[in-house]
Amino acid sequence: MVEKEYLKYDVETNNITIDEEVEKIIKDLLIENDRISEELKKYKEEIKSFIEDNSTGSFKTNLLDIKYTSATTTTTIDTAKLKSKYAKIAAECSKVGTKASSVSLKPLEIENEDK
């Protein structure tokens, strides 16, 4: 068994476990983060609409630096189409990069759980 503070790895079963208290803290933080993100999104939308309705731009308050970026168009390459029509060119122009490893955390809903 390999241990690191609140994490445990059982070599025989190939299972990782997290201390229940820490697991609960992480879940609560994720739920709170979602709630805060939604609330912040609402405020940002209201500020954006207000700026657009009043033809103003970026501005600063005592506590915030609010930067407004107007909508724009972009041109992208349809890589699936490029690869199917011009596979050789797509291969010649492709470059391989590395992407850092990451961990995604998502709370599970448990039946009859008090929230």
Image (cartoon, rainbow, N blue to C red):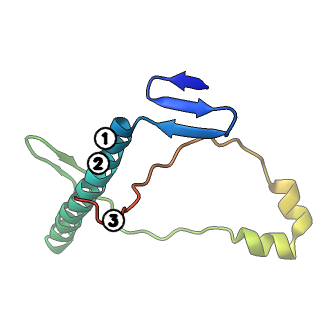
Reading the image, the residue beneath label 1 is 25
Residue 49, given in percent of the width and then of the height, sits at: 20, 71
Q: Kindly identify which numbered label has been placed on residue 3.
A: none
Cα–Cα gap, marks 2 and 3:
36 Å
Amino acid on which disc 3 is placed: Ser
Q: Position of residue 71 (x, y in %)?
A: 37, 69
In this view, the residue in front, 9 or 31, is 9
Helix, strand or loop status at disc 2: helix
Q: Residues within 10 Å of mark 3 (few under 14, many from 20)?
A: few
Query: Which residue does the image show at 84% across and 75% down from the upper left?
Result: 84
Residue 7 placed where, x, y %?
Answer: 49, 31
Give the mark nearer the N terminus: 2 vs 3: 2
Tell me if residue 26 can be seen: yes
59 sits left or right of 88 in the view: left
**Residue type of the residue flagged with mark 2:** Asp
Residue 42, above or below 5: below
Quarter of the image that includes the C terminus: bottom left
Disc 2 target residue: 28
Image coordinates for residue 51, horizontal then vertical, percent: 18, 66
Q: Looking at the rendered structure, which numbered label has been put on residue 70?
A: 3
Cβ–Cβ under 8 Å for marks 1 and 3 = no
Q: Are marks 2 and 1 in contact (CB under 8 Å)?
A: yes
